[in-house]
Image (spheres, rainbow, N blue to C red):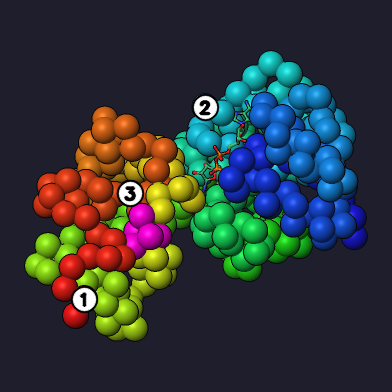
């Protein structure tokens, strides 16, 4: 069944996700402050919204895919925002990774207009956004979830409702802690092996099938070996996620010692001008301390 869907935020993730919805036969009205992805999607059959308010007026379901809490607040609650174009019965799905408390705050504001909001952040990165195989973790009202599940399944392979509003983003914080620490562990190990004179490409091949193997290792080691730090997922966004994780941990009195250390490494990379690199660029922190580089043509390949 074709649905009228609004899509706001057409960046690395939002653009391919919106394309999958167009290809599934839905009618999309789109908006982004950057005109480039808007033009590309209009060429594929989407309608250009004039503002977030305009998108909300023309759609029954409004999806947002924006960088952080402030952007989502501005787009939904700000001037000419989604809230101004809403009427009772519409559903907002915020798929951005933001602070869980902000999801709850926005949800209660839009509820005053009879609108339900779900928080539905994703994991998987650009390749899975393109393939429509993201993992989507959803918080919010079960009835609304069932109503939009078919749409989410056009963007993701795994779509799981984890609880009430905000719990999608709590789950995403857990995900981001695991990914950040995984990349750091991989970086620490590969710099050690390289500095010790072993070819990191061989190390990768040798360990990827064992217990040290992981989705992170398989996705990120080839990029590192090629010295390709094009994002993917920018360090700046991961700093944002760990900041949200640390704030949440402080609020509920949980210790997150390893996350704090990775957060500090990412801050050092930011100070060093590397914030726009893919998050596998964490390895550069270790490389600069060890004065070595992990790449395809590293020594001792005989
Ligand atoms: P991005 O910066 O590439 O895209 C964000 C888009 O939002 C941009 O096109 C920008 O122009 C638009 N935007 C910003 N402010 C706006 C406004 N006021 N009105 C309309 N449009 C506005 O970011 P991304 O990588 O696509 O990530 C989006 C979200 O998904 C983030 O919360 C991120 O943490 C999360 N995420 C990203 C990845 C990844 O691999 N990139 C993976 C999983 C989750």
Which badge, 1 or 3, is on the more N-terminal residue?
3
Residue 82 can be seen in this image: no
- Where in the figure is residue 207, as x and y percent of width and height? 27, 79
Figure quadrant of the N terminus: bottom right
Query: From the viewer's perspective, is residue 174 above or below residue 94?
Result: below
Determine the residue positioned at 58% across, 62% down: 128
Mark 2 closeness class: few <14, some 14–19, many ≥20 residues within 10 Å: few
Foreground residue, 241 or 216?
A: 216
**Residue at the location (26% across, 77% down)?**
202
Q: Which residues lie in the magenta part?
A: 223-227
Q: Which residue is mark 3?
A: 281
Say which quarter of the image contains residue 272. top left
Where, by quadrant of the figure, is residue 300 drawn?
bottom left
Is residue 28 part of the magenta span, yes or no? no
Residue 273 is marked as: none
Residue 285, position in %: x, y?
21, 46
Q: Quadrant of ligand 1?
A: top right
Residue 269 is situated, as x and y percent measured from the top left of the image, at: 27, 38
Majority SS type along the magenta span: helix
Q: Which mark is residue 301?
A: 1
* Tags 1 and 2 touching, CB below 8 Å: no
């Amino acid at each position: 069944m074709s649905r009228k869907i609004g899509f706001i935020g057409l960046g690395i993730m939002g653009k391919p996700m919106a394309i999958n919805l167009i290809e599934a036969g839905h009618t999309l009205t789109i908006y982004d402050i950057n005109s480039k992805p808007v033009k590309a999607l209009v060429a594929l059959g989407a309608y250009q919204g004039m503002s977030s308010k305009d998108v909300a007026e023309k759609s029954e379901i409004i999806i947002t895919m924006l960088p952080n809490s402030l952007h989502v607040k501005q787009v939904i609650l700000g001037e000419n925002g989604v809230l101004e174009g809403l009427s009772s019965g519409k559903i907002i799905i915020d798929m951005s990774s933001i602070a869980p408390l902000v999801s709850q705050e926005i949800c209660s504001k839009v509820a005053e207009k009879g609108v339900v909001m779900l928080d539905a952040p994703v994991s998987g990165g650009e390749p899975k956004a393109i393939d429509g195989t993201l993992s989507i973790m959803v918080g919010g009202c079960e009835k609304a979830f069932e109503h939009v599940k078919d749409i989410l399944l056009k963007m993701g392979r795994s779509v799981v409702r984890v609880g009430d509003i905000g719990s999608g983003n709590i789950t995403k914080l857990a995900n981001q802690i695991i990914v950040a620490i995984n990349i750091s562990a991989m970086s620490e190990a590969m710099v050690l092996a390289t500095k010790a004179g072993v070819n990191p490409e061989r190390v990768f091949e040798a360990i990827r099938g064992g217990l040290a193997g992981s989705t992170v290792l398989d996705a990120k080691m080839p990029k590192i070996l090629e010295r390709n730090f094009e994002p993917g997922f920018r360090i700046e966004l991961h700093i944002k996620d760990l900041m949200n994780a640390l704030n949440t941990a402080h609020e509920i009195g949980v210790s997150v010692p390893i996350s704090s250390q990775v957060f500090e490494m990412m801050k050092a990379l930011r100070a060093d001008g590397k914030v726009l690199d893919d998050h596998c660029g964490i390895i550069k922190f270790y490389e600069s301390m060890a004065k070595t580089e992990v790449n395809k043509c590293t020594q001792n390949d005989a």
